């Protein structure tokens, strides 16, 4: 027991610290003596802290108690001058708190309690955790939907549609499955002079077909069939320069593309194969390079060393990743192959399958840093028929991926003579009519494509 507290008089504003029962009915008693310096937390000579006035059972102050203290920082607590306690404050009042923060009095107005003195629970001031999760998930779903829809319309706006599949008298009837005519153009549109030099494309104007293929997508497997650009075939009558009609003739199929673009080429393919073309896709040099570069290059297994002066290609055998420039040279070079254009078509099929596999992979489609450049560079330079949409292009890529993965076939139109001499002495490619008809019928009827080798 601390003997120094014995005999301390009770103050008018508060009871002694010993038992809490000071004398009643006294107002303004003597102040408590200061605590010993060793026990006083406020420093030597500071007054001991006073307990707040106690209330009677009905909330009324006992007689002798002074008015409630005025809250404010006393001197010595860092308060500005002139903001000390109010005059006439009772001795038993609780001293203000440091920094001017008033003590919280139960039931007082302006405190943290609500009406009736009951403090609101923490749960009332914030949402329940389950509700927060639901709102967050809902917001993410909405944001994803908005982004998806916006991306869809943005990508669709990039497509260049042309009326290349117009009806004409005698056009083949629609068959089973879906047939794409895919054309690689040597168009230099979008390339600067320095780019043409770097890509070894030359500076020729206009456009000619550098490659053409029919992709059949059906229930009996997907088949990619290359058509040699030097195929010797009848070309239908068509409009020429200044509206003059050009009569039907027999020539290399590439001449149809040069004379009438995709529209005349599609009609020429249909009339010579009996296959109705459902969709058309054409891409030039600039778009081809852009697509390859946007996916970070295409992984290829080069079977033998390749060095071609005309295309600028210089590759070593083995697994490697081709850049856009290297890829363009790879699908164009032919002089190192014994069968020239036929060997080039095999390289084209092989590369397009690898490109489709990489472009349709989750690593490309789910990565915005590859997906958006792919869409921008690919669709921005792609020409399609008027009815082709993004869903159709997705089906095209998946079918190409399937062919490359062994789920389909890669063939060439059956050939009777790869060095057929035309009446003008040119070298052309003559189809094997009987075997070719078997393949064409399989495309039309969506049946298994026969092995015609």
Image: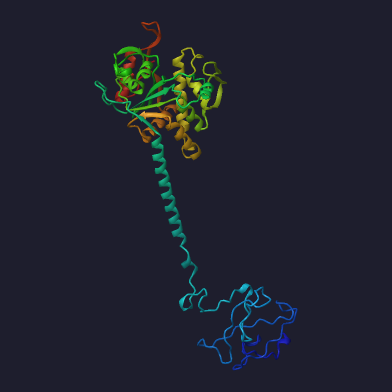
| Residue closer to the observer: 116 or 310 | 310
Q: In this rendering, is residue 228 above or below 289? A: above
Total labels drawn: 0
Is 203 left, or right, of 317 in this rendering?
A: left
Q: In this rendering, is residue 34 above or below 110? A: below
Residue 286 rendering spot, x and y as whole percentages: 47, 27
**Quadrant for the C terminus in the image:** top left
Quadrant position of residue 425: top left
Q: Is residue 301 visible?
A: no
| Residue closer to the observer: 164 or 181 | 164
Q: Is residue 285 visible?
A: yes
Residue 218 rendering spot, x and y as whole percentages: 34, 29
Residue at 46% across / 77% down in the picture?
115
| Residue closer to the observer: 373 or 302 | 373
Q: In this rendering, is residue 219 above or below 435? A: below
Residue 192 rendering spot, x and y as whole percentages: 50, 25
Residue at 69% across / 76% down in the picture?
76
Quadrant position of residue 198: top right
Is 18 left, or right, of 154 in this rendering?
A: right
**Quadrant for the N terminus in the image:** bottom right
Residue 135 rendering spot, x and y as whole percentages: 43, 56
Residue at far left of view:
169
Q: How is the image coloured?
A: rainbow
């Amino acid at each position: 027991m601390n003997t120094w507290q014995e005999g301390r008089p009770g103050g008018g504003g508060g009871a002694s610290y010993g038992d809490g029962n000071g004398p009643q009915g006294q107002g303004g008693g003597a102040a408590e003596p200061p605590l010993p310096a060793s026990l006083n937390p406020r420093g030597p000579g500071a007054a001991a802290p006073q307990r707040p006035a106690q209330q009677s059972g009905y909330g009324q102050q006992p007689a002798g108690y002074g008015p409630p203290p005025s809250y404010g920082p006393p001197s010595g607590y860092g308060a500005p001058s002139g903001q000390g306690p109010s005059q006439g404050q009772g001795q038993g009042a609780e001293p203000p708190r440091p920094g001017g923060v008033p003590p919280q009095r139960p039931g007082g107005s302006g405190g943290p309690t609500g009406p009736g003195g009951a403090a609101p629970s923490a749960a009332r001031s914030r949402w329940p955790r389950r509700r927060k999760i639901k709102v967050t998930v809902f917001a993410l779903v909405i944001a994803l939907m908005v982004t998806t829809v916006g991306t869809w319309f943005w990508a669709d706006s990039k497509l260049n549609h042309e009326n290349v599949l117009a009806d004409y008298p005698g056009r083949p009837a629609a068959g089973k499955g879906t047939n794409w005519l895919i054309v690689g153009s040597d168009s230099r549109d979008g390339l600067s002079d320095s780019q043409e030099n770097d890509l070894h494309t030359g500076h020729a104007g206009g456009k000619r077909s550098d490659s053409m293929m029919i992709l059949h997508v059906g229930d009996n497997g997907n088949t990619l069939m290359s058509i040699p650009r030097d195929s010797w075939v009848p070309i239908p009558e068509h409009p020429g320069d200044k509206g003059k009609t050009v009569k039907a003739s027999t020539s290399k199929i590439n001449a149809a593309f040069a004379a009438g673009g995709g529209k005349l080429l599609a009609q020429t393919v249909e009339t010579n194969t009996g296959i109705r073309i459902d969709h058309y896709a054409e891409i030039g040099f600039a778009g081809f390079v852009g697509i390859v570069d946007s996916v970070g290059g295409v992984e290829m297994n080069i079977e033998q060393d390749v060095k071609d002066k005309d295309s600028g290609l210089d590759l070593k055998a083995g697994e490697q990743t081709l850049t856009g420039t290297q890829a363009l040279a790879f699908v164009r070079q032919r002089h190192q192959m014994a069968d020239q254009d036929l060997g080039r078509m095999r390289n084209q099929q092989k590369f397009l399958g690898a490109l489709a596999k990489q472009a349709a992979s989750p690593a490309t489609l789910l990565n915005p840093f590859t997906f958006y450049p792919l869409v921008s560079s690919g669709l921005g330079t792609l020409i399609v028929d008027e009815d082709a949409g993004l869903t159709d292009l997705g089906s095209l890529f998946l079918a190409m991926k399937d062919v490359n993965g062994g789920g389909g076939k890669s063939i060439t139109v059956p050939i009777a003579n790869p060095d057929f001499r035309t009446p003008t002495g040119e070298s052309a490619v003559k189809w094997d009519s009987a075997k070719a008809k078997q393949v064409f019928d399989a495309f039309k009827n969506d049946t298994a494509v026969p092995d015609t080798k």
